[in-house]
Image (spheres, helix red, strand yellow):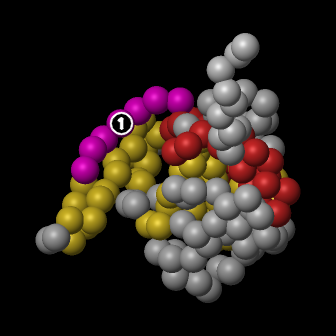
Amino acid sequence: MHVLDRIAPEGTSATRLAGWRFLIRCGDRSLAAAETRLTPDGWTFSHFFEGPYLASTELALRQAESTTQPYQARLLSLPDLYMLTLWLHGDCASDGASGHPAATDLLVPLAPAPPGIAAHRPHRVAELLPVLSLRVTRPPLLGSPA
C-alpha cells in the first residue's frame, strides 16, 4: 500500500510505500486482510483486519480486470481525506514499491468514500487529484467577528 501524505495543489504528488496488503480468502470470497510493515529486520505482518474495504477492494479489482488497458494495481491511501483508492498504474514494468501517480493513471475510490466522491468510479489522476487538493486546502484564518 502506498500513502499520499500531501496532495500538491497542481495535482501531482509523490507517494511512499507503507506496506503490503494481502487478502485472506476462503473459497471465492475474502474473509480478512493482513498488512505488512517494514521493520529493521525486514517486512513483517503488522496486523489483520476485516471491514468494508475488503468487499470494496474485491469489487474494484474485478472492475480493473475487465479493462482492456494493462495496469499495475496498487492501493493508495490518502490519510488527509480518510480515503483509500485502487491505483491503476499504467507502467506495468515499473517497480511496485516506488513511483508516483502519473496523470493518465486511474484512481478508483473504495467504499466508503468521502462525501461527494463516488466510490468505484474510475478517475484519471489529472482530474481527481486537483479536486481532492481543494478538499485538504485549509482556508486562511480570518480575524474574529466585529
The residue carrying pointer 1 sits among few (fewer than 14), some (14 to 19) or many (20 or more) residues within 10 Å by Cα, namely few
**For the image shown, how many numbered marks are present on the structure?**
1
Q: Is residue 84 above or below residue 41?
A: above
Q: Residue at x 54, y 50 (%)?
A: 77
Task: Name the side, left or right, on which 46 lies relative to 24.
Answer: left
Q: Nearer the viewer, residue 116 or 62?
A: 116
Q: Residue at x 39, y 44 (%)?
A: 33
* The magenta stretch spans residue 79: no
Q: Is residue 79 above or below residue 9?
A: above
Q: Nearer the viewer, residue 2 or 141?
A: 141
Q: Nearer the viewer, residue 95 or 55?
A: 95
Q: What kind of element bears circle 1?
A: strand
Question: Can residue 19 be seen in the rendering of this structure?
Answer: yes
Q: Residue at x 69, y 39 (%)?
A: 140
The residue type indicated by label 1 comes to Phe
Give how far across and how far down residue 67 sits, in percent: 81, 62
Q: Magenta residues?
A: 46-52
Which residue in the structure is indicated by mark 1?
49
Q: Residue at x 80, y 48 (%)?
A: 131
Residue sticking out furthest to the front = 146
* The magenta stretch spans residue 49: yes
Q: Quadrant of residue 17?
A: bottom left
Question: Can residue 26 be seen in the rendering of this structure?
Answer: no
Q: Is residue 33 above or below residue 52?
A: below
Give how far across and how far down residue 75 sits, in percent: 55, 56
Give how far across and how far down residue 38 sits, in percent: 27, 65
